[in-house]
Image (cartoon, coloured by chain):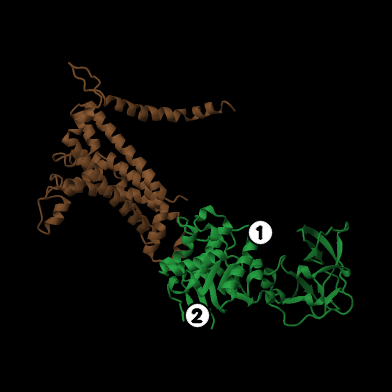
Amino acid sequence: MRKEWVTGYLLILPAAVVLAAFTHVPIVRTVHDSLFSRASAIRPSRFVGTGNFETLASDPVFWKVLGNNLAFALGTVPVSIALALVMALLVNRKIRGQGTLRLAYFLPTMLPMIAAANLWLFFYTPDIGLLDQILGAFGVSGTNWLGDPDTVMPCLIAMTVWKEAGFFMIFYLAALQTQPPELWEAAHLEGASRWVYFRRVLFPMLMPTTMFVLINAVLNAFKLVDHLFIMTKGGPNNASNLLLYYIFENAFAFNDMPAAAALTTVLLALLALLAVSQFLFLDKRVHYR
Amino acid sequence: MSTLRLEGVEKHFGGVRVLERLDIAVESGEFLVLLGPSGCGKTTALRIISGLEEASGGRVLIDGRDVTRAAPSARGVSMVFQSYALFPHLSVAENIVFGLKVRRVARAERDRRLKRVAEMVGLADLLDRKPAQLSGGQRQRIALARAAAAEHPLCLMDEPLSNLDAKLRQEMRAEIRALQQSLGMTVVYVTHDQVEAMSMADRVVLLRDGRVEQSGPPAELYARPETTFVAQFIGVPPMNLVALADGPRGAVISGCAPGAAVLDGPGEGVLMGLRPEHVSLSETGIPARIEAVDYHGADTVVSTRIGDQRLQIRIAGHFVAPKDGEVRLAWPFEAVHLFEAESGRRADLPPKPAKGNPQCSVV
C-alpha cells in the first residue's frame, strides 16, 4: 500500500518524459534564452535581463504585428464560430443530400493549409483571379488584394474563416446530435418558436461546445502561419505579419535568436493569459451536464 | 361539450397502419387512460392529439375547435413526457414558468401560478435548484408542475411514471390523481401498466393494434371484459381462459372425464374465463394438480392443471402445497365469464350451472 505512489509515478512517467522533453524544457530554455544577448563571433552571449524585451517594446514592427494578430483573432474567431453553428444547425436537419452537404462543409478543413492557401492565392490574383473576374463584370478590376495593406488582412481573415468553420461545425454537429428531441417538443408545445428555443434552450445547452471551440479558435488565431508563407510572407510592409511568423523571421531570417526567444515568451504569456481568463470568466456561465 | 374528441383518426407510417379509425371523446375534468401493450399506437394517438404528429385521416377537436392541422402551441395542451423533457440548464422555477414566459404572461400572474403549483407538488423549497440536483421523483414533479402551471384545458401524459421505482410510482399515482382532482384538469394519460390505469382512471380506453378494444370505467373492464384480450390484459395474474368440451351432462373442462360437467349446455368452441382471485380451495371442489407455487407475501399464486388446461389461482397468505400435489378448487358460479373461442368475443349466452355436483378427474 505504501508503494502505491511509486506505481502511480511510474505509470505517468512515459507521458511525463515526452511532455517534458518536447514542451516544458523548451519553454524553460526559451525563457532563459530571452534573458541573454545575441552571441556573435567577437562577443559571446551575456546576461542582459529584460534588455531583449525593452528592445521589443521599442520595435514598431512588434506592435504592428501584435495589433495584426489581435485583429486576426477578432476577425476570425466570432465569425467562424457563428458560421460553424449555423452550418451545423443546417445539416443537422433531415434534408435531402444531408451527407453530401456535411462533406462539402467539412472539405476545407480536410485540405492542407498550403493547398488551401494556393487555392485562395488564385482567387485573389489581380485581374485573372476569381474575385477580380467576378468584380470585372461590374467594372471593378485590377485590385491587388494581397498587395494592398488595407485589403490584405480582411483577405486572410476570410480565407481562415472558410478553412476553420467546417472544423468547428463537426463539434457543434456532434453536440446537436446528443440533444434529446423531447426538449424541442416540450418547448414547442409551450409556444416557443425555433428562435426562442435556440436562444433560451439550445444555445445554452451548447455552451460547453462553444467554450471548447472558442479556446481552440483563439489558440488557432495565434498558431496559424502556414498561409503567410504561401500568400504574403507577412507583407506588404508587415501589414499581414503575425506573431508566429515574426518569430520565425527573427529566428531564421534575421538570425536574432534572443529576439525570437523574447517574442516567444510574450506569445506564451499571452496564450496563457487568454486560456486562464476564458476558464475563469466563461466557465461559470457554462452549464455542464 | 367534450374537451377532446377524436373522430376517425388514422395514422400510417409509410405502408404501416398504426391507428385505425380511432373515436375517443373526453369530458371536461375527466381522467382518461389510453392503455395497451407496446406498439398498440397509444403514444402515437397522444402525439396526434398534441400536434407533434399529424393524423393521416380523421379529425381532432379540442373544446369544439378543429385542430387537426393546427400547430401544437395553438391547441392549448400541455404535456408531461416520459423522459420529463426538463431544461437542464434552467432552475426548477425557470423550468416551471418557461412556457408562461414564452407566452408573455405577466410577471405577477407568473409568480402566482408558480407559487401555487410548486406548493401543490411539494417543490416550494427547491425552486432554485437545477434538475440534475434532484431525484427522479422530484424531476417528475417539475414536469407535472410545468404542465399544471400552463392551465391549459387539456393535459397529456406519456408514461410519466415508467422511469420511477415501484414504491415511488405508487406514491406518484396518488399524487397525480390528487393534483388532477384539485385542479379539475382534463387528462389523457398513456400507459402500458394496467395497475396505473385501474387506480387512476375515470375511464380506460384499451387499445390493441391501433383499434379500441374496449372502453369504459376500470371496474367495468375488470368485471365485464368484452374480449379475451381485455380479460387477459386487466388483472394480475391475468384471467384464466379454460377451453371447454362437450359432455353428456353439460360442458366439461377440456381433458376431463366426460361426465364432470362444470356448466350446462355445449362446451365445444367456448372458453371459460375465471379470475385467479375468484377461485378458492374447497373440500367439495374439482380436483386439480399443483404445478407451481409463487409466494408473493400477502398472497400466493398457485398454478394448477385441470384436465389439459392450466388454471392460476390466488390464495391469501402463505400457501404450502400438500405433499401429494392435489387440491380441490371451487368458484362461485357468478365469477364465470364465457367467450367464443374463435373470435375471442364475449359469448352472449349467460352461463348456467351444471346440474348436479361438478366432478372432474385429472387425466
Image location (x, y in percent) of residue B325: 86, 59
The reply to whether residue B18 is in sight is yes
Question: Which chain: green?
Answer: B
The local secondary structure at tag 1 comes to helix
Q: Earlier in the sequence, mark 1 or mark 2?
A: 2
Chain letter for mark 1, please: B
Circle 2 sits in a helix, a strand or a loop, which is it? loop
Can residue B363 be seen here? no
Give the numbered dot on residue B63: 2
Query: What is the crowding at mark 2: few (fewer than 14 residues within 10 Å), some, or many (at least 20)?
Result: some
Q: Colour of chain A?
A: brown
Q: Nearer the viewer, residue B76 or A172?
A: B76
Q: Label 1 is placed on what type of residue?
A: Lys
Question: Which residue occupies 26% across, 45% down?
Answer: A73
| Image-based side of A134 in relation to B199, left or right | left
Q: Quadrant of residue A20?
A: top left
Residue under circle 1?
B167
Q: Position of residue B104 (x, y in %)?
A: 40, 69
Location of residue B363 with respect to A281 vertically, above or below:
below
Instruction: Please give left or right for residue A143 compared with residue B282 in the image.
Output: left
